[in-house]
Amino acid sequence: MSHPKIKDRNGAGQMCRLDVMTAEPHHGVMERRKTTIYLDADVLTAAKVLAAARQQSESQVVEEALRAYLDSDRIEAARGELRELMDRVAARSDLSDEQAMDIADGEVHAARAARRSRRSA
């Protein structure tokens, strides 16, 4: 079924409609919901090509892309909070950067060793 092409808000490029099924948790079960979005024709074509290459539905490709975009905002916010925390810790520390890195490196190695021993047990 072909979707109607409409002009975008600027009247410039072509926009295409894509009906997307999304999943939402409902009583512990993911419930699918249908929504309609309008995309530039080239974006829709790219989504269709990617869906075919991955043997996925267009809805799955759009949902994954949206989740990745939303997660990137959360990750960036977390990075900012981590930088702020590290700056506060550094302001209160008497350690040099080299000493702090040695301690951090030691903790990372210890955590990895503990994880390996749990896996092999």
Image (tube, rainbow, N blue to C red):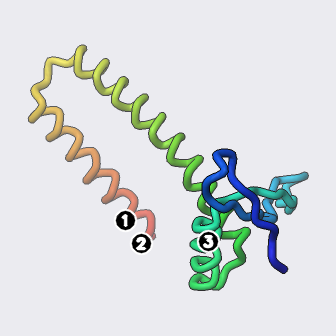
Point 66% across, 50% down: residue? 11
Q: How far is the residue under mark 1 from the one under mark 3?
A: 40 Å
The secondary element bearing badge 3 is classed as helix
Quarter the C terminus occupies: bottom left
Residue shown at the point (59%, 60%) measured from the top left:
65
Q: Residues within 10 Å of mark 2 (few under 14, many from 20)?
A: few
Do the numbered discs 1 and 2 sit on residues whose CB atoms are within 8 Å? Answer: yes
Question: Which residue is labeled 1 in the image?
Answer: 116
Q: Which mark is residue 47?
A: 3
- Is residue 36 left or right of 16 when viewed as pictured? right
Q: Nearer the viewer, residue 105 or 12?
A: 12
For marks 2 and 3, the one nearer the N-term is 3
Q: Residues within 10 Å of mark 1 (few under 14, many from 20)?
A: few
Residue 72 position, x and y percent, is 50, 47
Residue positioned 90% across, 52% down in the render = 27
The N terminus: image quadrant? bottom right
Please give left or right for residue 102 compared with residue 84 in the image. Answer: left
Q: Is residue 5 left or right of residue 94?
A: right
Measuring 23% from the left and 21% from the top, which residue is drawn there?
A: 90
Q: Earlier in the sequence, mark 1 or mark 3?
A: 3
> How far from the left and from the top, in percent, is residue 106?
21, 46
In this picture, residue 81 sits left or right of residue 101: right
Q: Which residue is mark 2?
A: 120
